Amino acid sequence: MSDASARVADATGNWVDTLAPQWARPYLRLARFDRPIGSWLLLMPCWWSAALASGMAHDLSRLPLTILLFFVGAFVMRGAGCTWNDITDRDLDAKVERTRSRPLPSGQVSAKQALAFLVAQALIGLVVLLQFNRFAILTGIASLVIVAIYPFMKRVTWWPQIVLGLAFSWGALMGFAVVFARIDVTALVLYAGAISWVIGYDTIYAHQDTEDDALIGVKSTARLFGAHTHQALIMFYGLAVMLIGVALASGDARWPAWLGLAAFAAHLAWQIRRLRIDDPALCLRVFKSNRDAGLLLFAGLLADAVMRGS
């Protein structure tokens, strides 16, 4: 068994490495608590849909609790998803410079220990899910099918980012399921917009590993687009803004939501202008900035909900 204090290559200088008990560090790394950006990105569509649906319902009574539950659920279920991903990818991760220091390929935990940890996280996620109505519970459970198949997609398709988008955008449906106990056209359009956003930002993320991925035969939109990545980002980010705008119009959103969408669009444009695909460190920084883009849109949607609910 490897030293539990050994750090993950792309997650240095975080609280897990310095403050967490040594026995807990490999598990916290499996759940990516040393790199919470993915949890924030999973959370953003949840918060968007909760705010938009609450505004449409003119009812803020459950919104604070829903926001809190989505926060807990996103961090726990992203941890479970990453644990599952690491279990299935442990042999591939051992061949990639950036990932070979992760807990499983480096021997900090065994596959059986990781599986037990996965079950524990899933049970916490289930407790969160059970706080909602029956339709929302079933909607949340349905997402597990996509989560289960995602790690295998990069072996068979150049578009694994689409499957990641289906999973990471699921929250765009959950807000409507919680508020209305149904999924309507507005929710589906918001979901489609979020998927386009995910394809864009995960393409940026995947540019960190294009050389290693090419050597081991892993496929991605980063390898597919290559030198045309900027043009692809213009298309997918532009589609995301357009579809989210259609969702806002369908939901009769007021000016704060549109202001939030404008700020979101401006941030995405900044990313495209800033990005250099041959600079892995910059790719990571630009990728991480999508949390801020998502929060800008959420701020507008929340203000809109407060305006309509008061």
Image (cartoon, grey):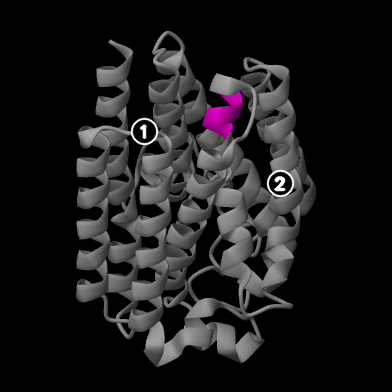
Q: Which mark is residue 277?
A: none
Q: Quadrant of residue 257?
A: top left
What type is the residue that disc 2 sits on? Ala
Q: Which mark is residue 114?
A: 2
Front one among 163 and 151? 163
Q: Quadrant of residue 47?
A: top left
* Tag in front: 2 or 1: 1
Q: Is the N terminus in the top left, top right, bottom left or bottom right quadrant?
A: bottom right
Label 2 to label 1, Cα distance in Å?
45 Å
Q: Which residues are magenta?
A: 174-178
Answer with left or right where residue 257 lies relative to residue 236: left
User: For mark 1, what is the residue?
Assistant: 252
Which residue does the image show at 66% across and 26% down from the upper left? 136
Front one among 33 and 22? 33
Answer with left or right where residue 77 lies relative to residue 301: right
What type is the residue that disc 1 sits on? Asp
